[in-house]
Image: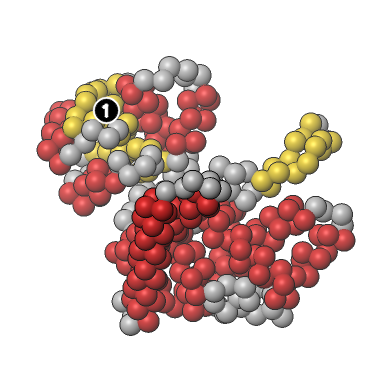
Amino acid sequence: MKMVRFFLGLDVGKSEIVATLMDDEEKELFRGSFKNQLSGFREMMKAVTGVTLNLAKEYQIYAGMEATGTYYLKLVKFLYKKVDGVTPYVINPNKVKKYMEYRGSRTKTDLQDSRIIAMCIRDGVENGLFRPWFPSRKEHEELKQLVRLRESLLTMKNMEKNRIEGLEQNPDNSPHAMKILEDHVAYLSRQIKELEAILKDNIKHGNFPDIEKDIERLKSIPGISDLTATCFVSEIGEIERFDGIKQIVAYAGLSPMEKQSGTSIRGKAQICKKGSKKLRQILYMPTLAAIRCNPVIKSFYEKLLEKGKKKMVAITACMRKMLHIMYGIMKNKAYFDPALCMPKVR
């Protein structure tokens, strides 16, 4: 008996999910709104499977949603763990937007979004464009939360320090306000140190065994510190989720773009900054350090300057090369070897 395919588009908001179910011919079979909570998930899948069971004995539901904030996490984990016959997909919102433009849709409503997502999933599955969602390992999830909390605390600390500097410019500043701000900065500093100690302790005592090995290998690259390696691993998760170097470069927003017309290239080459800003931030300072102490990156940087490239363009290219090296190390489970400049990354 032929397996029948259904496509479920899910537009996930803070409190509500709008669902559209369609078949292989893009015929709409069901639509509805449900609460973004466990009872709503169950109610939605009861309604959806009620439709699919009437139409086919053997079927597969491909469910897609956008990666917007954290609102989708409970739903996608529910579909992955609790519902048989459903393959969940989480799609970059930019891809859905481009797909809307491709299909000529200009209406921006939740109902339209859920239908577009269902259509996008259908074409993506048909052409092998998307990978099914799978959960990060528990240790990766915990590491990411700890690293991001540290980043948030650092941001808060810098904001408070800026406030202190602002008050210092005022001859009539309030001593009480100054004391509260200084105490808050000291408190945040203690919290940051405590978090860093927890990170080091977890890695040192083997609580993240696979992650520990990746971090040790990454630290073999001149310019990469223990903290940088930890932040990098926490941000990208399992390296296996990337199909190749081009995908991780695009994920970081470091893909070069050129303004091109016919056979001529006009203007300056730029990078596509639609990827992970956090990953670019993680790479920036270590790349500056690598330009000074890493023979591969230093030589590459100097050659770019000799060719007349501006310093910022050269630094960005070095960030991309660092990412190539870091990807190669994690993919091949190797240590940095400047003589080989890493195995060829495909």
Determine the residue positioned at 87% across, 54% down. 308
Q: Is residue 322 above or below residue 226?
A: above
Q: Residue furthest front?
A: 172
At label 1, counting other C-alpha atoms closer than 10 Å, the crowd grade (few under 14, some 14-19, many 20 or more) is many
- Residue designated by label 1: 18
Q: Is residue 138 above or below residue 66?
A: below
As drawn, is 235 to the left or to the right of 291? Answer: left
- Please state which of residues 263 and 270 is positioned toward the viewer in this rendering: 270
Q: Is residue 48 visible?
A: no
Secondary structure beneath dot 1 equals strand
- Please state which of residues 124 and 10 is positioned toward the viewer in this rendering: 10
Where residue 329 appears, as percent x and y from the top left, is: 55, 72
**Quarter of image, res 61:** top left
**Quarter of image, res 298:** bottom right
Amino acid at dot 1: Val
Determine the residue positioned at 21% across, 47% down. 78
Where residue 245 appears, as percent x and y from the top left, is: 58, 58
Where residue 252 appears, as percent x and y from the top left, is: 55, 52
- Please state which of residues 233 and 163 is positioned toward the viewer in this rendering: 163
Q: Is residue 210 above or below residue 89?
A: below
Determine the residue positioned at 54% across, 74% down. 225
Q: Is residue 174 visible?
A: yes
Q: Is residue 322 above or below residue 29?
A: below
Coloring basis for residues: secondary structure
| Quadrant position of the C terminus in the picture | bottom right
